[in-house]
Image: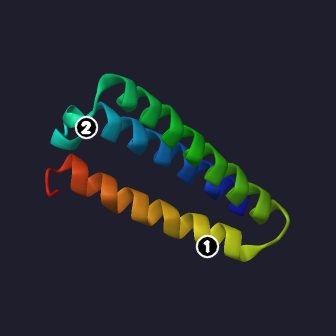
């Protein structure tokens, strides 16, 4: 069950990442195009590695892996909300 919840949270995290990268935030506009492309790929790689680590830890019965990924998802959602709502 924890693996399924982490998987759904991972989908949400990828969607939030995509929404932030597609936003017209002033910080992203200041980045050179090459650096922006590299940053998008690197952030997706980190997102994927976090998802795999959380799922593996939960699959092996380590509850702190699921709790950690849940906290990571909450922080990710909060920061994406701040960026997309223009509060930052």
Q: Residue tagged by mark 1?
A: 67
Q: Which of 41 and 84 is in front in this view?
A: 41
Q: How far apart are marks 2 and 1 (CA)?
A: 31 Å
Q: Residue tagged by mark 2?
A: 28
Q: Which of 35 and 5 is in front in this view?
A: 35
**Residue at x-position 14% and y-position 50%:** 86
Which scheme is used to colour this image of the protein? rainbow
* Residue 1 appears in the figure: no
Residue neighbourhood size for the residue with mark 1, other residues' Cα within 10 Å, grouped as few (<14), some (14–19), many (≥20):
some
Q: Which of 29 and 62 is in front in this view?
A: 29
Q: Where is residue 51 in the image (x, y as percent from the top left)?
A: 64, 51
Q: Position of residue 69 (x, y in %)?
A: 59, 64
Question: Where's the C terminus, which quadrant?
Answer: bottom left
**Residue at x-position 29% and y-position 28%:** 32
Q: Position of residue 25 (x, y in %)?
A: 19, 40
Q: In this view, does 4 lie above or below 39?
A: below
Q: Is residue 62 left or right of residue 41?
A: right
Image quadrant assignment for residue 35: top left
Q: Is residue 61 above or below residue 43?
A: below
**Residue at x-position 82% and y-position 70%:** 61
Q: Where is residue 79 in the image (x, y as percent from the top left)?
A: 32, 58
């Amino acid at each position: 069950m924890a693996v399924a919840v982490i998987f759904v949270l991972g989908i949400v995290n990828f969607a939030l990442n995509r929404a932030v990268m597609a936003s017209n935030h002033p910080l992203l506009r200041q980045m050179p195009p090459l650096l922006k492309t590299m940053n998008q790929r690197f952030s997706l790689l980190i997102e994927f590695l976090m998802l795999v680590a959380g799922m593996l830890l939960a699959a092996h019965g380590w509850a702190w892996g699921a709790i950690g990924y849940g906290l990571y998802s909450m922080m990710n959602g909060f920061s994406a909300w701040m960026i997309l709502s223009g509060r930052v």
